[in-house]
Amino acid sequence: MAAPEFLVLADDSALDFMNTVALVDDGLYDFLGTDEDVVAWLKTIGFLGEHEKPSFKHGALVKAAHALRDVIRKLVFQKKQGKRVDVALLNAFLSHSRYSVRLVREATGELQVVHDYEKSTPEQLLTEVAEAAAELLATGDFDLVRKCEAEDCVLWFYDRTKAHRRRWCSMAMCGNRHKVANFRARQKHASQSK
Ligand SMILES: [Zn+2]
């Protein structure tokens, strides 16, 4: 079976990273099973250039990614529950980060500030994920950081809709399922009351 495509639906890259464990075909599936998966995910999100080929000791990147994901999940839960956020856990990752800053003139003549991240260790390759998590925890509105309402769904999102009424990870995966379940329940109810 081909690996399912990454789910990019959270409207926040730290939450998308958390969502790399998801319910697929009635079982939890880890989208980050190998080093290559992690590289592919970073490219999908745009944290790694299409042609970059990082190479570390076999298994080191996926191990670091799982550790970071556990930390992000723990801290997001803590923040969501109004508990004290264990910042030291995330700082253990952030302390690896090194970057330099340049002012770049684009071909169009526009100027851009570019951060060049050092990527010589697995932790450094994950710096932007850890940074996104730090930003989310520091500046995110956690009333809008929510888990999908489907009970068996483990996906999280940042509700950036105007009305702030987002309920599902995606309409296709859980929203419609809910509608169908409601419809069936109503039909059952209707046939029982006949
Ligand atoms: Zn869902």
Image (cartoon, helix red, strand yellow):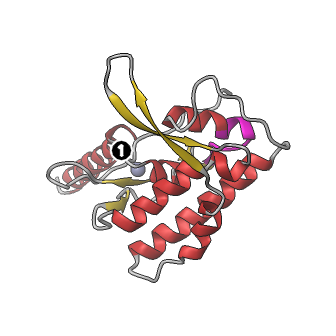
- Residue furthest to the bottom in view is 84
What count of labels does the image hold?
1
Q: Amino acid at mark 1?
A: Arg
Query: Taking 45 as reference, is 113 left or right?
Result: left
Above or below, 191 relative to 107? below
Q: Out of 12 and 124, give the one closest to the viewer.
A: 124
The N terminus, quarter of image = top right
Pointer 1 residue: 177
Query: Taking 67 as reference, is 139 left or right?
Result: left
At mark 1, the secondary structure is helix
User: Going 47% across and 48% down the picture, which residue do you hit?
Assistant: 16
- Residue furthest to the right in view is 57
- Answer whether residue 137 is visible to the viewer in this image: yes
User: Going 51% across and 50% down the picture, which residue do you hit?
Assistant: 19
- Name the image quarter holding residue 192: bottom left
Q: Out of 108 and 11, give the one closest to the viewer.
A: 108
Query: x and y percent of residue 130 in the render?
Result: 55, 56
Query: Taking 73 as reference, is 125 left or right?
Result: right
Query: x and y percent of residue 180 in the render?
Result: 30, 43
Above or below, 189 relative to 104? below
Query: x and y percent of residue 187 in the render?
Result: 23, 47
Query: Taking 156 as reference, is 193 left or right?
Result: left
User: Going 85% across and 44% down the picture, which residue do you hit?
Assistant: 57
User: Going 39% across and 22% down the picture, which residue do you hit?
Assistant: 106
Q: Out of 128 and 21, give the one closest to the viewer.
A: 128
Q: Which contiguous range is marked in magenta? A: 29-38
Q: Residues within 10 Å of mark 1 (few under 14, many from 20)?
A: few
- Residue furthest to the top in view is 107
Q: Out of 43 and 70, give the one closest to the viewer.
A: 43
